[in-house]
Structure formats: structure tokens, C-alpha cells
Amino acid sequence: MLEKTGIATPENLADITPSAERMAKGPVAVIECFQRIPCNPCQTACKRGAIKEFEDINDIPGIDHEKCNGCGMCVSNCPGLSIFIIDETYSDKEALVKVPYEFLPLPAEGSFVTGLDREGKPVCRAKVAKVLNTKVQDRTPVVSLVVPKELSMTVRCFSIEDFYSDNTIVCRCEEITLGEIRELIRKGYQSLDEIKRISRAGMGPCQGRTCRQLIMQELASSTGRKMSELRMSTFRPPAKPIKLGALVGGEDNE
Amino acid sequence: MNKTASVVIIGGGISGCAIAYNLAKKGVRDIVVIEKSFLSSGSTGRCGAGVRMQWGTEMNCRLAKYSIEYYEKANEVLEYEFDIDFKQSGYLIVAATEKEDVQFRKNVELQNSLGIPSVYLTPKEAKEIIPYMDETKIISATFCPKDGHLNPFHTTQAFANAAKRLGVEIMTYTTVNGIKVEHGRVVGVETDKGFISTPVVVNAAGGHSKQIGDMVGVDIPVYPERHQILVTEPVAPLQGPMYMGFALNIYCQQSPEGSFIMGRGDENEPRDGRINSSWHFLEEMAKSCTSLLPLLSKLNIVRQWAGLYCMSPDRQPIYGPVKELEGFYLATGFSGHGFMFGPVTGVVIAESILGETPTIPIHMLDKDRFKRGELLLEPSVV
């Protein structure tokens, strides 16, 4: 599979994932290099001897996770951008994932970006904790992303566009953006009902099936309340659109 | 959290917000509006959002004309940051009975005498305005191009924001639990957020105004009547004007964003303040709509809701002070037309409280007209 898709499979990852005990101790390098090619800069970059000497330059790197302290020297030295530092001790619920990033522009520290998995699918919102870009990195900057802990072995890149950005469409029927919702919350509209009535979010054909939850999330996160404490808007009939003609029996509601 | 106010207005709909704004504009300070939920959460936000000058009594014609002319410039006057979405694409009111036809001829004469540009139309002429209507179902119609449609939420918010800029305090999510009376006059309002001392209380509580009256033993001869509305998916512009029939019990309009809004009431329902949605309404509405405007049978209904008309015995508002309790003012009994009368309600109630000569004489709209038997029965109500 890997040869065809370029995406590591769970089996591939099982071989290279550090033990849970090691993860619990702090930052550690995860080498996602699965193909024999003549390449060894990671081994020479490692000052701690955690990456074993190559017998053949085509060898796949072997790492002793116990010796690795997660310094990250190997990350920007890997031409294949396949080494990451994972720190699951970052906080109770978050992990730090350091990824090599060779695109411009670089994200600003403190900004939010969209965490992507190995296939490039957006999986979470990630905060940029640090951008390391000195001579040592040699134009392969290392970006530290704060991600939900359960995604520490999932997030491997990011899109600089925050998918929770103001431009994100929250209500697709009425094309209301997150920015518009945030602005209304700032102006003092304090419930889903109020936001719905003033913005039309949730009044379109889908009747709020998508935006209802998203607006509730935004209300909760911006007011520091739990979603369960917020007032839901009324669910109104009909449950799904029905033709006027179908109600009088004259028209199929296909 | 007790406080003192010069005026407390109960009800955060169009009437309450417009009264607060007009009082504040006239220099009254310490005005409080109390709303038990959010602004326009009651009848204002549930209404069909149409406004018309085509009425059957001189009083209603004048109240409506004033209000519509106000709405024409409301965005600017109220300095509203969004848009109240006022579109004047007219009302086509259809007569389905001989009696209605006779009445409509009289109505147009009255309306024209008051400067309202309505016209009497044959079914064929009416069909030119809404080409897909079944003109065989009607006898005649009247049309006024100045009638229209605007957004109740934004309109209420526009009055509320302007009022707030003038210092009005709007307390949402606040419930009135009682009104304190001493020596035959109002002295304060008890709410779940504390007591507010005030010499003036305005009852603008719409479908709940009777309960507010009951708190102080003022019997207001109104009752709530459920009216229901359905809204369809949005489609390309098809229908400019509102289609309305009284005997046919229908109003149907395409809103500016493309969805059709149609509604009706049932005067035989229990008068218990229910605002749930019924399947019966969907069927009855669909029957009327597909028979009168057959093209619309292809439209998908996406939502229905209900609200309360606050019905008065003569289908006209009840305005002003009450004899039995000093400091207690009414702005109620709109019988389904509170939203369209919002601007004039704000003006005349503010004038009434301040003892000024009213812009439109409203003394005959007092509560006691029913006792005196001086009803001004409005024939044109759906």
C-alpha cells in the first residue's frame, strides 16, 4: 500500500511508534521512513547516538527511543521530511507535534492553523507554539503545533489557513461565515435564537442541521459556558422538506 | 438589584422598542424595557412581516399610512447598522364573496380619500399582477403599490439600538412577576431580577398583555389567537406583491431572499395561548395555496411556526391610559397588526404618556370604548 499511496499504513506505524511508557516521559523522535534509499543525514545529525549506525547506506534508520531526548536535530536534517518530534507531556489534553515545513509563508507564532493528517485531510485546529528557523535548520524550519493529545500520531502537516477562520462558512444554506457569527456575539447577541433571527443562519433548506451545532460551539467557546448550558433553538416541523402539492395529494414528493 | 425608572415598558417587541425610542427621543430618561426572552421573540418575530395601507376603517388606514411612510425612511432615521429590508412591492387583496366585493369598493374609496393609492381591479387585471393565480376563484381585487414587506427582527433591533444609544435600558431574559400599586396608581414593577420603582408602566406584552392587566386588576378585553405560518425553500423571484384574501383566509408572499411565506389563523381554536405547530394547518394551507396559486404546489416547505394575534373586539388597537389605574398605559389588542403599526404606536403612546397632543387622535381607541359600545369594527383582517 505504502508504495502505491505514499501514505503509511497502521502496520507501518506500529513498527515505529514509541512505547506508551516512552511517550509519557517527554519529547521523542518518530521516524516515518519506510523505504530503503541511500540516505543517512539523520544518523549523522544525532549527537546522542540514538539513531543506530547504518551498516548499509540504504538501511532504514533504527532509533533507540530510550536514548532519544527529542532534541529535534534530525528533523530538519531529514531530506524526506519524515521525522517528527512528539511530546505528549505538553499539557493534560494537548500534545506538541514538531513538523518540518518547507512552504512559505511561515505561520506566525501564536496563530491558529489547520492540522492535517498523512493524507492531507484536515483533522483539527492547531496552535503554532513555535517556529524554529535558524542556520541550524538550514531552510527546513521546524514548526511546533499544539494538537489534541489523541491526534499526536495523526497530525503530520498543516494548512496555514485556519479552518475556523472568519471566512469559514458556518451556515451553508444562507452563506453565513464564522466571522459574521463572531461579530454578532461581540455585539451582544447571546443565544442561538437571536443569532438565527438576525443573521438567517439556520433558516435555509437544511433548517440548521449543520450550523446549529457550530454556532453553539462558538457561543460556548466565546462566552466560556458549556454547550449544555446554552439555550437550543426550537426544532420545527416538518422534519424534512415536503412539497405543498404532496400535502394535498396531487403531487409526488420524490 | 433594585432600581428606579421613569417609565417601565413591558414587552420587547416592535411596540415596546418603538415606544422606548420615542420617549427617549423626547428627552425622557431612565426608561427600562423588560422582555422575558429576547427582543422580538414573541408576536413581532413570528409575524408574516407584511405591511399594508389597505384597511377598512379610517383609523387603521391612518395608523398604517403613517407607519409605512415611517418605514420608508427608518434605516436612516434610526441609523441602523444593518438593513430593515423594506420592499414595497404591493398587496393584492382578493375578494371571494359578493360581500367582500362591496366592502372592497368602499375601502378603496375611503383609502383614496386619505391619500392611499389603492385601485380596484377585475380578476383579469389582478392576474396581470400575479400571472399564475387562478382568477376564476375571485370576484375582484384591490391593489396598493405602497404596501410591502420588511424584516421584523432587524426592524425591532433598529428601534432597540437607537433607543439604547439614547440611554434606554433593555433587560432581556427578565420576567415580570407583579406590578405594585398604591392608592390607585402604579409605583413599581417586580421582576425576577429585582424591583423597579416607577410611576409609569406600559403594557406592550402582545399575546400576554391580558395577564399583565390581570396583575393589577385591569380587565383588558383581548384574547390570544394562534396563527400559523409556513415558509418554503428559496426560489428565483416569482411574485412581487403579497396575495391576500380575508374570506379565503390566506396571505402569501415571496420574501426578498426568495422563500414564500404563507399563513392563516383559525378563529374557532381554543383561546389558550397555544403556539405549537399543527399538521392540520399545513394541510389546510396547502389546499388553499395550491388551489389559488397552483404553480406554488411544486415548492418545498422547510419550516412552520405559530404566533399569537392579540385580538381586540373590533380588531383595532387599544391605546393609552386606563381610567381605573393611574400610570398604567396600554399598547395592545393589535389583532395581528402590531408589527405594521409599530412606528405609529411608538409615537402616539409616547405623546400620550407625556400629555402631548397626539399626531393621530387616539382617544377613541381607549379601552373603555367597548363599554361605551363605540366599536370601530375593522372588516379587513386575515
Image (tube, coloured by chain):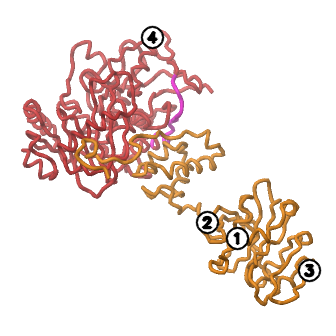
Q: Of the residues tagged 4 and 1, which is closer to the observer?
A: 1
- Foreground of the two, B277 or A111: B277
Q: Say whether residue B265 is left or right of residue A211.
A: left
**What's the residue at 51%, 18% (across, down)?**
B178
Tag 4: residue type? Gly
In percent of width and height, residue A213 lies at 55, 49
Q: Of the residues tagged 4 and 2, which is closer to the observer?
A: 2
Secondary structure of the residue carrying tag 4 is: loop
- Foreground of the two, A242 or A76: A242
In percent of width and height, residue B234 lies at 33, 54
Label 4 and label 1: CA atoms lie apart by: 76 Å
Check if mark 4 and mark 2 are on a common chain.
no
**Vertical relation: A179 (above or below) B374:** below
To which chain does the residue with label 2 belong?
Answer: A
Residue highlighted by disc 1: A156
Residue B166, magenta (yes or no): yes
Label 3 and label 4: CA atoms lie apart by: 92 Å
In percent of width and height, residue A76 lies at 78, 80
Tag 1: residue type? Arg
**In terms of image quadrants, where is residue B121?**
top left
In percent of width and height, residue B199 lies at 48, 21
Read off the magenta span. B162-176
**What's the residue at 85%, 71% (across, down)?**
A70
Secondary structure of the residue carrying tag 2 is: strand
Q: Which mark is residue A47?
A: 3
**2 or 1: tag closer to the N-terminus:** 2
**Vertical relation: A164 (above or below) B326:** below
Say which chain is red.
B
**What's the residue at 26%, 12% (across, down)?**
B371
Q: Which mark is residue B184?
A: 4
